[in-house]
Amino acid sequence: MQQHFSLADCEVVGFDLDHTLCRYHLPQSERLIYDSFAEYLVTEKGYDKGLLTLTPESLDFCCKGLVLDLEDGNFLKLAEDGTVLRASHGTRSMTSEEILEIYGRREWKHFSAVRGMLSRSGKYYLYDNYFDLPGALLCARVVDSLDQHDGQKKYDFWKDMVAAIQHNYKITAFKEECGMYFPEVKNHPDKYLQRCPESVKKWLKQLKSAGKILLLITSSHSDYCRLLCEYILGNDFEEYFDIVITNALKPGFFSHTPNQRPFRTLENDEEQEALLSLDKPGWYSQGNAIHLYELLKKMTGKLDPKVVYFGDSMHSDIFPAHHYSNWETVFILEELLGDKVMVPAETESEPLEKKGKYEGYQPKAPYHISKQWGSFFMDRLPGLENAEETLVRTWSCKCISTYSTIAIPSLEAIADLPLDYRFTRFSSNSSATSGYYPRPPRALLTSEESVTMK
């Protein structure tokens, strides 16, 4: 495989919407999501009213990459080989001794299923994006509450949590003003949404001018998609894209066959009849990557057009686009912001005049790094008996280098680069830090790499 990746080599550029093209004000949106689920559990399912009160400090619990073991009420942070690095029961952190006693120094029992990024299970839930994370804190507090009142050892709250999610996010919720989430974003978009930077809008136009086909593929329903896009891009947002696909129900969009998931046309945001094939650009609902790719072949006149897809969810965007469709994937990872580190000399692949402004830019972290869970990328594995602890990569970190072409903190970070900029891609024969742009996370840099800093 080539060592470098360039947008100039791609005929098609696709984007996820939420937390990719559309950035949220995270503290406000986290709180809204938490409140919308908690309100449902308390008013509809009779859970403890204490769940409705939340201190800002408690949001420190939220950390991407956690797995909830639904039977035991335990949250786990996994190493790349599936051993448990940190754990909590509800919100309470477990000691190293407790972790060794319960999980030992071996692969967690469901790791093989999680590792294959298979569909969600009734035994565990993976938290890998900002829409999910507030639910992790709520579930942890539910476990605390059940322990306090019922002294439970096995937990049966998940069905109620799923009902809370469905109530707030169901397809008709936006139109019906149902639940707390959509009415609040509708009435106060400025509180929750960040407008698209001018540099990104200019970059999207530049991609189109260069003859690229632009896709928007989102699991959000068409009415919510319209609200977001009008706010972040403007009323002419449809001019940026050749094809818009809403209610895509990812990862199923990539993994399902045309028979299982046909495209549908839309009329006033209502889904119409199923289509036997996709014949022309436009706005569609549901669908599948196979029919989409057939249309892309026609549009480009190529037998094997090269597609790159930008997304923020490993489970819904990156893994399935890479695994099922063999697309190039760019992982949007805000955790890359706020790591104040310069680029190691050996990873530089372009002359200075081609550098983007973000390569010398050191922003402050726009989100918090969890004190309870530590680095998203690395952690210490306590030594057995008197052995020294060792630094190991997290499973989340391993997934990035396995399924992503490159990882960036935001679209803005690359918007000022020339389209033929050559990124060093992740590959099995390069260093574990090679695919991160503009710089690798500090936690991944070994002491040897740190010495070679310029």
Image (spheres, grey):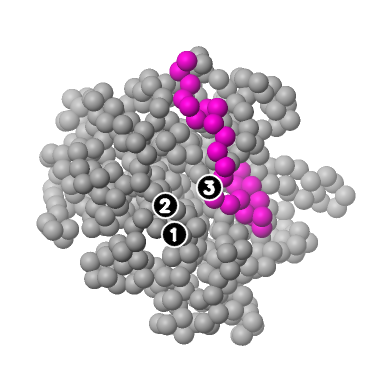
- Label 2 with label 1: CB-CB less than 8 Å: yes
- Label 3 with label 2: CB-CB less than 8 Å: no
* Residue 68: image location, x then y, percent: 55, 63
Point 56% across, 25% down: residue: 429
Question: Which residue in the protein does label 3 denote?
Answer: 366
Point 72% across, 58% down: residue: 104
Residue 150 counted in the magenta span: no
Mark 1 Cα-neighbour bin, 10 Å: few <14, some 14–19, many ≥20: some
* Residue 114: image location, x then y, percent: 51, 53
Compared to residue 335, the image places residue 425 above or below, namely: above
Q: Secondary structure at mark 2?
A: strand
Q: Quadrant of residue 170?
A: bottom left
Q: Would residue 235 be found to the left or right of residue 159 on screen? A: left
Q: Residues under labels 3 and 2: Cα distance?
A: 11 Å
Question: Which residue in the protein does label 2 denote?
Answer: 24
- Label 3 with label 1: CB-CB less than 8 Å: no
- Residue 29: numbered disc: 1
Point 29% across, 72% down: residue: 178
Magenta stretch, overall SS: loop
Question: Mark 2 vs mark 1: which is more N-terminal?
Answer: 2
Identified by mark 3, the residue type is Pro
Where are the magenta residues, as a range? Answer: 353-377
Q: Would residue 362 be found to the left or right of residue 357 on screen? A: right
Q: Would residue 270 be found to the left or right of residue 24 on screen? A: left
